[in-house]
Image (cartoon, helix red, strand yellow):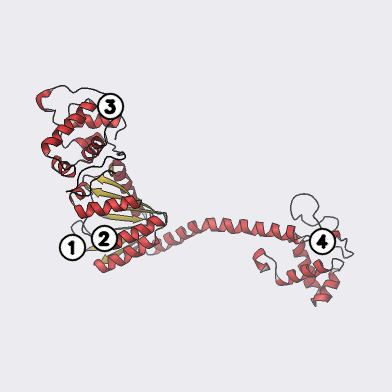
């Protein structure tokens, strides 16, 4: 046990003997413990260096601070040695060793990184693993998601190889461990009742979701160290293959790609209906949407009909329904999809869009996007 603070068994016995009888000389300690005299002297010297013993004149290294250290029972030994109070001496040793262990622990991640990149340099083939078929892909995804400790990012796109219930369980468990889970979805999910219901449920559990007009590829990156993506961009659903990429410049690049797309995406509207045939938006709460570019509105940049000038109202506040409409337009949904989500006719939708343009003081959707972003509504 004492080895954990750098004290050998012999040194421990010498220290205990002097604690019990501080009047012992080194020779008497050697006789009492049946040790060679030179061995006893070496142990005493080590105990003085460790701060467990000191000489009455203070020649030994201090156990703590600059002042004299307390001896046991204040004894003045004839043997020229004085044991230091173990509460002081051992406490100092323990703190010193704990500091060394903390510094070593702080180096573990860097040591592991050096070890990994050393092996990667020796055998670059270990960087990439081909996962052939649904079973192999699901097995590795389970392992990765179950071990996620900090961060999971996902670009959602078909085909899907894992059952949605299992996906939900793995994600919910990760969120419960405090893992940050961010997912990007294409706007086409708003036309899929089952998918929309699934995403809405995961958002309630803590997933951070955003919408892109199109998702460029299927991708998952776990803890910024492992990425999984399709073998090609045209994988056959009957024989789906993926590649698993270990931590490297490639995983860094894939993670950076996600971050770029994340900044460009629109936040998931918190007032989405239950699905394409839902009952429309709810009235409680407000929607927070973000976009880095007004070009998300460019699916329809035609000026308002009849060429009338728009009325400017810089102090206008959007209603909940207008905020939802704004988020759909910013996400790049077509009018037909928006009308389906809001459970209204396309004619009613055009009327609502016109009203939104009036509030923004815009004559086109493109201009409305720019004005909304300028006012902090995007």
Instruction: Name the mark on residue 237.
Output: 1
SS at circle 1: loop
Eye-nearest disc, 3 or 2? 3
* Tag 2 secondary structure: helix
Which residue is farthest bottom? Answer: 34
Mark 2 and mark 4: span between their CA atoms? 69 Å
Badge 4 vs badge 1, beta-carbon distance below 8 Å: no
Question: Mark 3: few, some, or many residues within 10 Å (few <14, many ≥20)?
Answer: few
- For residue 42, say whether it is visible: no
Question: Can the viewer see residue 47?
Answer: yes
Where is mark 4, residue-wise? 72
CA separation in Å, label 4 and label 3: 80 Å
Mark 4 vs mark 3: which is more N-terminal? 4
Q: Is residue 184 left or right of residue 175?
A: left
CA distance for labels 3 and 2:
42 Å
Q: Indicate left or right for 242 with 171 as reference.
A: left
Which residue in the protein does label 3 denote?
Answer: 316
Between disc 1 and disc 2, whose residue precedes? Answer: 2
Q: CA distance from mark 1 to mark 3?
A: 50 Å
Image position of 148 (left or right of 68): left
Q: Using a 10 Å C-alpha cutoff, classify the residue at mark 2 as few (fewer than 14 neighbours), some (14 to 19) or many (20 or more).
A: few
Dot 1 crowding, Cα within 10 Å, few <14, some 14–19, many 20+ = few
Q: Nearer the viewer, mark 1 or mark 3?
A: 3
Q: Of the residues under marks 3 and 2, which one precedes in the sequence?
A: 2
* Label whose residue precedes the other's in the sequence (4 or 1): 4
**Residue 164 badge:** 2
- Examine the rendered structure and indicate whether residue 209 appears above or below residue 335: below
């Amino acid at each position: 046990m004492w080895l954990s603070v750098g004290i050998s068994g012999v040194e421990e016995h010498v220290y205990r003997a002097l604690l019990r009888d501080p009047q012992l000389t080194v020779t008497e300690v050697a006789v009492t413990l049946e040790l060679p005299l030179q061995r006893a002297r070496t142990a005493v010297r080590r105990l003085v260096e460790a701060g467990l013993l000191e000489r009455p004149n203070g020649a030994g290294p201090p156990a703590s601070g600059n002042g004299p250290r307390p001896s046991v029972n204040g004894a003045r030994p004839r043997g020229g040695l004085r044991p230091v109070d173990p509460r002081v001496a051992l406490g100092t040793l323990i703190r010193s060793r704990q500091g060394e262990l903390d510094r070593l622990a702080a180096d573990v991640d860097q040591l592991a990184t050096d070890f990994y990149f050393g092996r990667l340099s020796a055998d670059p083939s270990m960087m990439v693993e081909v996962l052939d078929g649904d079973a192999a892909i699901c097995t590795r995804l389970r392992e990765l998601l179950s071990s996620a400790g900090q961060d999971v990012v996902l670009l959602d796109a078909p085909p899907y190889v894992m059952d949605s219930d299992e996906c939900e369980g793995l994600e919910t468990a990760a969120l419960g461990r405090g893992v940050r889970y961010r997912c990007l979805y294409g706007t086409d999910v708003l036309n899929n009742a089952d998918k929309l219901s699934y995403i809405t449920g995961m958002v309630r559990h803590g997933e951070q979701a955003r919408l892109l007009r199109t998702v460029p590829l299927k991708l998952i990156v776990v803890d910024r160290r492992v990425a999984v993506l399709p073998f090609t961009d045209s994988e056959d659903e009957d024989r789906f293959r993926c590649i698993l990429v270990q931590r490297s410049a490639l995983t860094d690049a894939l993670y950076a790609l996600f971050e770029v797309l994340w900044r460009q995406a629109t936040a998931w509207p918190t007032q989405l209906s239950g699905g394409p045939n839902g009952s429309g938006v709810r009235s409680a709460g407000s929607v927070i949407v973000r976009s880095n570019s007004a070009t998300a509105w460019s699916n329809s940049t035609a000026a308002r009909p009849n060429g009338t000038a728009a009325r400017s109202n810089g102090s206008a506040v959007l209603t909940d329904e207008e905020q939802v409409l704004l988020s759909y337009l910013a996400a790049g949904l077509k009018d037909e999809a928006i009308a389906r989500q809001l459970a209204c006719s396309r004619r009613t939708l055009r009327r609502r869009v016109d009203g939104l343009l009036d509030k923004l003081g815009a004559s086109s959707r493109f201009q409305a996007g720019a004005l909304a972003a300028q006012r902090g509504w995007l």
